[in-house]
Amino acid sequence: MFGNTKKDSTAAENEIIEQVGTIIGPGAVIDGPLTTKDSTRVDGTIKGNVNISGALIVGQEGKIFGTASGVNIYVAGEVNGNVTAPQGKVEISDTGKVVGDIICKGIIIDENAVFQGRCEMTGLDKNSAEIAKERAAANKEANDAENNSEENNNENKDSDK
């Protein structure tokens, strides 16, 4: 049950890794901003803001000292700054550390991951909240009707005796 979810996310991550167009290797240090149009993997150190039009993967040895933005962001290393993926998700693995605020549509934080900051979820409008409340009310009404029907059946059986 739980293993399937991990396999699915790993398969999705592998698919993204295959499409990585820019790699900042271990030992590389960039002192300044980095902007790319394709998915990027960081295994080195970046001292500046990172703006990626695709996915951003921060490997276990990767470090970013500045803001990081991308479509989807996977952190296995360290980010000291705000992380922004307003239309995508942010995932912090068990070896990952984020010290800063996160803005995203979805978030996954593994056990033993470090997140020190505030998270703001995007894509949550009042309409979806109202829809959720309506669904909950409809489910409650359906359950109440089902319970009343069972009670009536039990009363009819008792009166037949």
Image: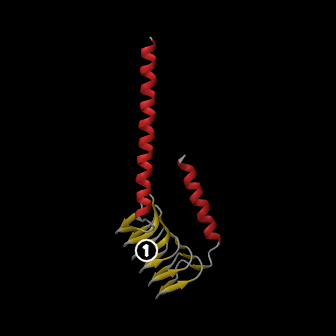
* Residue 126: x %, y % from top left: 40, 63
Estimate how packed mark 1 is, as few (under 14), some (14 to 19) or many (20 or more) residues with alpha carbons within 10 Å: many
* Vertical arrangement, residue 28 with respect to residue 103, above or below: below
Q: How is the image coloured?
A: secondary structure
Of residues 156 and 36, the one drawn nearer to the viewer in this rendering:
156
| Residue highlighted by disc 1 | 83
Residue found at x 34% / y 68% = 118
Quarter where residue 113 is shown: bottom left
Which residue sits furthest bottom?
Answer: 32
Q: Is residue 44 left or right of residue 20?
A: left
Which residue sits furthest left?
Answer: 117
Residue 77, visible in the rendered structure: yes
* Residue 137: x %, y % from top left: 41, 47
* Vertical arrangement, residue 156 with respect to residue 37, above or below: above
Residue found at x 52% / y 85% = 35
* Vertical arrangement, residue 135 with respect to residue 37, above or below: above
Name the quadrant of the C terminus. top left
Of residues 102 and 28, the one drawn nearer to the viewer in this rendering:
102
Q: Tag count in the figure?
A: 1
Residue type, numbered disc 1: Val
Residue found at x 42% / y 16% = 158
Residue found at x 45% / y 69% = 104
Local secondary structure at mark 1: strand
* Residue 112: x %, y % from top left: 41, 58
Residue 111, visible in the rendered structure: no
* Residue 96: x %, y % from top left: 45, 66
Of residues 112 and 29, the one drawn nearer to the viewer in this rendering:
112
